[in-house]
Amino acid sequence: MESSTLLALLSSISQLILLLLLSPNSTNSSSSCANVFPIAHSFLSSHEMAATLSLLTLSRKRKRTHLSERDSEPTDHDNDQELGGGDSVQLGLTRNPDSFRNCFRMTSSTFEWLCGLLEPLLECRDPVGLPLNLSAERRLGIGLFRLSTGSSYPEISKQFGVSEPVARFCAKQLCRVLCTNYRFWIEFPNPNELASVSAAFESQTGLPNCCGVIDCTRFKTVKNGGFHEESIAAQIMVDSSSRILSIVAGFRGNKGDSRVLKSSTLYKDIEAGRLLNSPPVNVDGVAVYQYLIGDEGYPLLPWLMVPFVDAANCSNEEHFNAAHNLMRLSALRTIVSLKSWGILSRPIQEEFKMAVAYIGACSILHNGLLRREDFSAMCDVDDYSLYDQSSQYYRDTSLEENSIERKASVIRTALAAKAKEFQNTQV
């Protein structure tokens, strides 16, 4: 029971007892005394009931309420949207699916699902000496609004009716929770899962044993009041549905794609035989090991197929390049979708470490939404070449070894013949 309710109840009891003691009939007969207890019991019962109802009301307010996507738009007199927990949050958004997606890049049902998962983690730790007294829904809303729109902390403070330090804390807290506790949403597939990934690519292009597409993109950052601009390189590996299977971010953006690759644990694990180590498949007498698809910024390796240069018209090489480009679309679609998160769509005005956390958090949410089959944050564009940075970051030829490249070239040639054969069957 809350202290204010308890004090009010005790005060009322004291007044009743004092009234009964001062009553002129209170000392005259035992029957008068006997009447005291039913009256007091009735009085106490009524107050206990009132207190119970009050607590039930508070409890219901604390429960998460469902966000409506079909309610009418807010007027000038009502521009608040309840996120649950009794928190009336000034979102300034219309209560329809498009507006909700614009602000949080997910549907309201996904928001509730995500809040249910993160609630214990979001509420378990507040700043030292500064209890926030904010519901999980409100904390999640503030953090998602920062990621989705890229709004500044003063803007978020005004929008949600909290101080700037609180807005900053909620945004960082969401990133920390996602990057620490939900990293498993981005996980390299096990052998059985890789078989499914390969089957999906093969049905799309006819090329067997492809386990993913690898690409590298850059996110700009600014510091020192916006006068010093840098970039962060992020290497991703995706399947045909644009699900991220591996990501590594934190390299300086001026590092070439092949250098980023060689510095990554993905490269070291594959080279050491810890990944992509299933038996090869036979393609026209050539052993084709599990491999990835990459652009011309990468070296040609037995496990990494890059396009042919200057492929002749109607040749096997041209058919391979066509299939190669088709598979690469899943990676470019992922990059476009990540860069459509407001915080990543412009130079990130945070310290380098926090900027990397934003990239990680948006990537984890990207996969989480795909798990829910919520495509609110997925983007398609007419011209993916605008997002293809491969020509800007040339591979370092010193990484190549002739014997390895020759072996890879034999595999790629066999796959090129397979690509032409498949495309001829589609005509």
Image (cartoon, grey):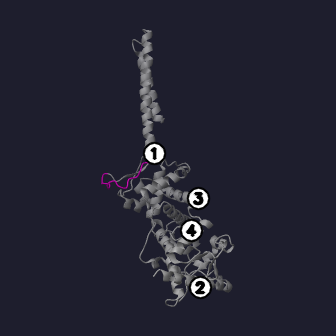
Quarter of the rendering occupied by the C terminus = bottom left
Residue 319 place in picture, x, y as percent: 51, 84
How far apart are the alpha carbons under marks 1 and 3?
26 Å
- Label 1 with label 4: CB-CB less than 8 Å: no
Q: Residue furthest bottom?
A: 312
Read off the residue under disc 2.
Answer: 413
Disc 2 and disc 1 in contact, CB within 8 angstroms: no
Disc 4 or 3, which lies upstream in sequence? 3
- For marks 2 and 1, the one nearer the N-term is 1
- Number of the front mark, 4 or 3: 4
**Residue 117 visible in rendering:** yes
Residue indicated by mark 4: 196
Q: Which residue is mark 3?
A: 180
- Is residue 426 placed above or below 125 in the rendered structure? below
Q: Amino acid at mark 3?
A: Thr
Disc 1 + disc 3, Cβ < 8 Å: no
**268 lies left or right of 217:** right
Would residue 74 be counted in the magenta stretch?
yes
Kindly report the distance in space between the C-alpha atoms of the residues bearing marks 2 and 3. Answer: 43 Å
The secondary structure type at the circle numbered 4 is helix
* Alpha-carbon span between mark 2 and mark 1: 61 Å
Q: Are marks 4 and 2 in contact (CB under 8 Å)?
A: no
- Residue lying at the far front of the rendered structure: 425
- Segment colored magenta: 64-77
The residue depicted at 51 percent of the width and 51 percent of the height is: 119
Neighbour tally class for label 3: few under 14, some 14-19, many 20 plus, Cα within 10 Å? few
Mark 2 or 3: the one toward you = 2
Mark with earlier residue (1, 3): 1
Q: Can you tell which mark lies on residue 63? A: 1
Q: Position of residue 258 (x, y in %)?
A: 60, 79
Q: Is residue 322 left or right of residue 301?
A: left
